[in-house]
Amino acid sequence: MDGIILINKEKNCTSNNVVNKVKHILNEKTGHIGTLDPNATGLLPILVGKGTKLSQYLINHDKEYEVELKLGIKTDTADLEGKIIEEKEVADNLLEKEKVLDVLNGFIGKQKQVPPMYSAIKVNGKKLYEYARKNVQIELEAREIEIYEIKLGTINQKENIITFTVHCSKGTYIRSLCEDIAQRLGTIGYMKELNRTKVGIFNIENSISVEELEQNKNNPEELNKYIIPIERIFINIYGNNNCISLNDRKLGLFSNGVKLTYGLSEGLYRIYNSKGVFIGIGSVKDKTLKREIVL
C-alpha cells in the first residue's frame, strides 16, 4: 500500500495524531505534508508506505482555505485558542461590503508576511511557540508569499465576522493574514475558524475521515479506493509524457542505484519495465538518470 491517502482532519487533533492513527489502522509507515493546526479542520494528505519518500517532491504546493475572521478582538495566538489581549469596538462602516472587498482584493499578489509567534518555525534550534510561551520576544523576518485569489463569503455585522476563501502559496500563515486584514479595515481581529480544502492537486472532495478509515480497516478493497498510487500522483503533477522504459539489464542497474547515461531534459521521470509495468521514479540531471523511488 504505497502512495497518499487524503484525510479530512477533525478539530482538536494534531497532524501528528492523525499520522499515528493512520499508521495504526493501515499498519504502514506514514507521514504527512502540510501541517494543520489542532483547531483547524480539512485536508491533510498522508503519505503511506513508500509514498513517504514523496515528501521532498511535494513541499511547494499551494493551498486553499475557507476562513472565518472575527473582528474587534485580538488574541496572543491570533486564533481562537489564545488569550484575549485587546478588544476594540467595530464601527458599522468597517463592514460595508465595498470596503471589505476593497481590502481583501488589496492582498492579491506577492507580498511580505511576518509569521505569527505561535508557529513551529525554528530560530536557533527552538520553535517560535516555545519562545512565545516564555514571553521571549524574537524579531521575525518577513517572508515572501503570494495570494493568488481571495473571495468574500459572508459579512455578519451582528457578530463582526467575515468569511472568505483564499488560494495562496506555501508558507502563507492564515492567522497572520487575518490580523493584517483586520488592521487594514481599521480594527483588530483573529482567525476564528479555518478549513483547508485543497493542497496542490489534492482536493477535500476525495478525502476520508479517520473514523471512516477505522471502520474499513479490515476491507482492503475499500481502503485501496482511497490510496492515490505514486504513479498517478506523478502523472497528475508532471503530465503523461515524462516516462522512461528500461530493458531488464538497465532496470537491474537502475534498481541497484547505478546511474545511467540518458540524453533527456532535466527533471523527474516515471520508470517502467519492458512490459510497461510501473517501477518507480528517477531523476535526470547532467544527462544522467538516477534512482529516486523504486517500488
Image (tube, grey):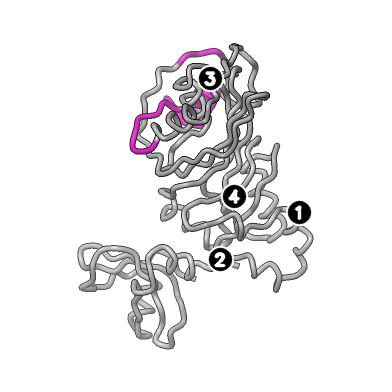
Judged by depth in the image, the label closer to the viewer, 1 or 3, is: 3
Amino acid at circle 3: Asn
Kindly identify which numbered label has been placed on residue 43.
4
Few, some or many C-alpha atoms within 10 Å of disc 3 (few <14, some 14-19, many ≥20)? few
Residue stretch in magenta: 108-137
Q: Quadrant of the N terminus?
A: bottom right
| Residue beneath disc 2 | 228
Q: Earlier in the sequence, mark 4 or mark 3?
A: 4
Q: Is residue 276 above or below residue 112?
A: below
Judged by depth in the image, the label closer to the viewer, 3 or 2, is: 3
Q: Earlier in the sequence, mark 3 or mark 2?
A: 3
Q: Earlier in the sequence, mark 1 or mark 2?
A: 1
Looking at this view, is 155 or 72 the one in front? 155
Q: Quadrant of residue 148?
A: top left
| Residue 293 spot, x, y in % from top left | 43, 65
| Residue 233 spot, x, y in % from top left | 48, 65
Amino acid at circle 2: Ile
Q: CA distance from mark 1 to mark 2?
A: 19 Å
Q: Are marks 4 and 2 in contact (CB under 8 Å)?
A: no
Amino acid at circle 1: Glu
Q: Are marks 1 and 2 in contact (CB under 8 Å)?
A: no
Q: CA distance from mark 4 to mark 1?
A: 15 Å
Looking at this view, is 90 or 168 the one in front? 90
Amino acid at circle 4: Leu
| Residue beneath disc 3 | 93
Kindly identify which numbered label has been placed on residue 211.
1
Q: Are marks 4 and 3 in contact (CB under 8 Å)?
A: no
Q: Is residue 120 magenta?
A: yes
Q: Earlier in the sequence, mark 4 or mark 1?
A: 4
